[in-house]
Amino acid sequence: MSSPLRLFELTDRVAVVTGASSGLGAAVAASLAELGARVALVARRADRLGALADRTGGIAVPCDLADPDQLDTVVPAVVEQLGPPVILINGAGNRLTTARAEDETAESVRQTLQLNLVAPFRLAQAVFPHMQQTGGSIVNVSSISGRVGVPGIPQASYAASKAGLSGLTAELAVQWARHSIRVNTVAPGFFRSEITDSLYDSDRGAEYLRRNTPLPVEASAEDVVGAITWLAGDAARYVTGQTVVVDGGWTAR
Ligand SMILES: NC(=O)c1ccc[n+]([C@@H]2O[C@H](COP(=O)([O-])OP(=O)(O)OC[C@H]3O[C@@H](n4cnc5c(N)ncnc54)[C@H](OP(=O)(O)O)[C@@H]3O)[C@@H](O)[C@H]2O)c1
């Protein structure tokens, strides 16, 4: 048997990582690059993507994924500059409203679904003709709120979009398995990032997180990167259609 570490090598594989300008997406992009992948970094903040591309040897592909026309340009740009992708990490996502479910507007529901569910689906469709030739790995980033209700933090459309990713994942996995395209989802619990800093920084928020998270860890993006990196490469070559929960035990209670 060859070294188990070789299962994690990604030498010269072309990867597309959305949400790569900060938080989890940036950490995943750096991890894939460290393992040898050539990474296309996708998000809106071009300056941040450029800085990370300089450090990792990848390329920046600035794009507002909520805009369908811009989204359609992403994969062709990657193919032209790096070649056909064999890894897609759909990391971009956001909770766009703090409204309670009964008050969410139709427009806010649509925008949330567009960014968190439609964009990952469209990007998966865009990489399909390339991965059809070679096989590949698609990893979506969901949330525990796609699994369970989260008391005190209203997020109905966000939860619906993230749960949708798990359904999409199982269906694509089954449809595309014959092309050796694996499709999985990672569902993180809370970790510190730009979207959760204020929660971690308030005494009440920090206590809420401690009370609900069995493992005594203040999680960061680094605590979620391992699962995504594993699913991206050959170490997970027999894993498809799954939603892997990485939450310090939040949903195990
Ligand atoms: N932090 C948590 O506790 C937590 C828990 C569960 C799941 N998640 C999920 O984890 C993923 C990463 O979140 P994070 O916590 O690391 O937050 P983050 O640092 O705010 O990262 C979100 C990323 O998405 C990108 N993005 C947002 N809107 C975009 C748009 N319209 N077009 C293109 N890119 C867009 C942002 O880049 P630009 O602003 O530059 O566009 C940023 O790179 C998200 O899918 C989130 O839902 C987070």
Image: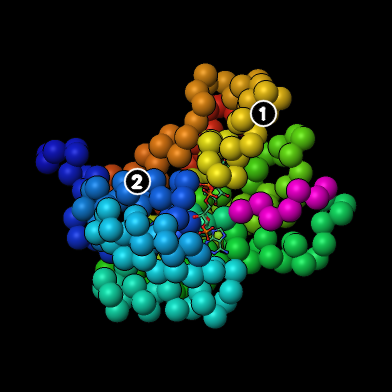
Closer-to-camera residue (55/225)? 55
Residue highlighted by disc 2:
229
User: Does the stretch in magenta take in 85?
Assistant: no
Q: Is residue 176 left or right of residue 1?
A: right
Type of amino acid under label 2: Thr
Q: Nearer the viewer, residue 143 or 243?
A: 143
Magenta segment main secondary structure: loop
Please state the total of marks drawn on the protein image. Answer: 2
Residue 138 rendering spot, x and y as whole percentages: 41, 58
Is 61 located above or below residue 1 in the figure?
below
Query: Can you name the residue that lies furthest to the left here?
Result: 2
- Kind of residue sitting beneath label 1: Ser
- Residue at image point 29% right, 79% down: 80
Q: Position of residue 186 (x, y in %)?
A: 49, 46
Find out whether residue 99 is within the magenta segment. Answer: yes
Q: Which residue occupies 74% across, 39% down?
A: 153
Between circles 1 and 2, the one closer to the viewer is: 1
Q: Quadrant of residue 1?
A: top left
In the image, what residue occupies the spot 36% across and 77% down? Answer: 77
For label 2, the SS is: helix
From the viewer's perspective, tell me whether residue 203 is left or right of residue 143. Answer: right
Left or right placement of residue 134 versus residue 202 in this view: left
Quadrant of the drawing holding the C terminus: top right
Which stretch appears magenta? 94-100
Q: Is residue 24 left or right of residue 206?
A: left
Please indicate, yes or no, whether residue 177 appears anywhere in the rendered image: no
